[in-house]
């Protein structure tokens, strides 16, 4: 373990100057047009302090390993390019010490995810196993909230932010898109919290770091607190990190004035929405827009009118927005999700 820690810590400083273009051109030569695009994306999102402190060799190694993971793991191949660039490629999440965590985490996580078939399965396997492997768990005795993986491993402890950094880095090492999420202050002013988000199949899901739940993602002790977040108050909102500039910042409570880390306000995904109450909705069914009305059976119980019946003589169902209604015409049945509104016109040729 000691030699691995030496590899993680201790990136010596290096003044980039004009060598950023050397890194970009080197990426193009080694990895083609996509390599150049990835390198430029990485450089454009770098904090100024990193431009002055990191070696181009470190950036190239990070790029090499990220692209290798993209080719090796099936879930990573399917990740949209913009998500890969923003949530797999970056070498850091917050303002933690920069280090080569990819080389450290890859062999461990590759073994953990060997039986995984999906991004979620991979993320779950990592969350379940990596913290025991590296022997790091929650402890308020840690030195700093924003510890890097190596710093947390050296101490054998971290709090929510350090644990989240570990989980995000471990996931990224095997091509799983991940990012840090959290709030600066719960709505009841009880304190802050940090966790991780995982991207799978076009959606973001959350999980507590070192808080594996066999029932799946989007579970955690903090869901009740998160449901009360306030989107238009930055300190009570829920934020996710981004490498790409967003015009907003991720609030780091240990360095609240720091604006180096872009943020995305994701509060709406956590706040509980009031369920619409069921009520009477009126339906008409047409063969197509501008076409003729059809006689249809809705949910096997209500018949729509057609022909010379008054246009306002409509079928009535007690449903709510978002419910699924089965529409049967003749021997064929199709479905529709109830949209908002008291009167709904359905077009047979558009139903699935």
Image (tube, rainbow, N blue to C red):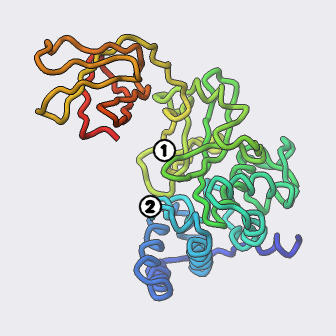
**Residue 155 in sight:** no
**Residue linked to disc 1:** 264
Point out residue 327 in the picture as x, y percentages from the top left corner.
Answer: 35, 29
Compared with 340, 212 (above or below) is below
**Is tag 1's residue or tag 2's residue first in the polypeptide sequence?**
2
Give the quarter of the figure containing the C terminus. Answer: top left
Callout count: 2
The label shown at residue 82 is 2
Q: Is residue 232 left or right of residue 160?
A: left
Query: Percent x, y for residue 96?
Result: 67, 57
Q: Residue at x 73, y 64 (%)?
A: 115
Closer to the camera, 152 or 223? 223
Q: Nearer the viewer, residue 67 or 150?
A: 67
Q: How crowded is the residue under tag 2: few (<14 C-alpha within 10 Å), some, or many (20+)?
A: few
Residue depicted at x 26% and y 18%: 343
Q: Looking at the image, is mark 1 or mark 2 nearer the viewer?
A: 2
Gap between marks 1 and 2 measured at Cα: 15 Å
220 or 101: nearer the viewer = 220
Where disc 1 sits, the SS reads strand
Side (left or right) of 28 relative to 124? left
* Res 11 quadrant in image: bottom right
């Amino acid at each position: 373990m000691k030699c691995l820690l030496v590899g993680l810590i201790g990136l010596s400083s290096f003044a980039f100057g004009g060598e950023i273009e050397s890194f970009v051109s080197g990426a193009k030569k080694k990895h083609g047009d996509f390599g150049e695009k990835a390198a430029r994306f990485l450089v454009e999102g770098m904090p100024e302090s990193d431009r002055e402190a990191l070696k181009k060799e470190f950036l190239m190694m990070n790029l090499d390993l990220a692209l290798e993971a993209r080719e090796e793991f099936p879930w990573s191949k399917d990740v949209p390019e913009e998500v890969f660039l923003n949530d797999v490629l970056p070498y850091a999440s917050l303002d933690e010490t920069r280090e080569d965590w990819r080389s450290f985490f890859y062999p461990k996580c590759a073994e953990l995810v060997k039986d995984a078939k999906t991004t979620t399965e991979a993320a779950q396997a990592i969350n379940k196993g990596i913290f025991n492997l590296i022997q790091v768990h929650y402890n308020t005795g840690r030195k700093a909230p924003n510890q890097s993986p190596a710093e947390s491993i050296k101490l054998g402890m971290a709090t929510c932010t350090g644990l989240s950094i570990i989980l995000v880095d471990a996931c990224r090492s095997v091509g799983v898109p991940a990012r840090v999420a959290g709030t600066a202050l719960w709505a009841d002013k009880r304190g802050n919290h940090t966790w991780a988000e995982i991207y799978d199949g076009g959606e973001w899901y959350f999980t507590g770091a070192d808080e594996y739940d066999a029932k799946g993602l989007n579970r955690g002790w903090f869901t009740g607190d998160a449901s009360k977040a306030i989107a238009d108050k930055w300190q009570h909102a829920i934020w996710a990190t981004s490498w790409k500039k967003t015009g907003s910042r991720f609030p780091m409570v240990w360095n609240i004035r720091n604006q180096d880390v872009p943020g995305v306000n994701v509060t709406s995904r956590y706040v509980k929405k009031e369920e619409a109450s069921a009520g009477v909705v009126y339906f008409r069914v047409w063969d197509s827009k501008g076409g003729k009305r059809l006689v249809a059976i809705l949910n096997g119980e209500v018949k729509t009118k057609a022909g010379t019946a008054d246009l306002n003589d409509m079928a009535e169902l007690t449903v709510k927005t978002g419910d699924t209604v089965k529409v049967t015409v003749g021997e064929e049945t199709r479905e529709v999700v109830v949209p908002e509104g008291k009167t709904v016109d359905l077009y047979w040729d558009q139903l699935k």
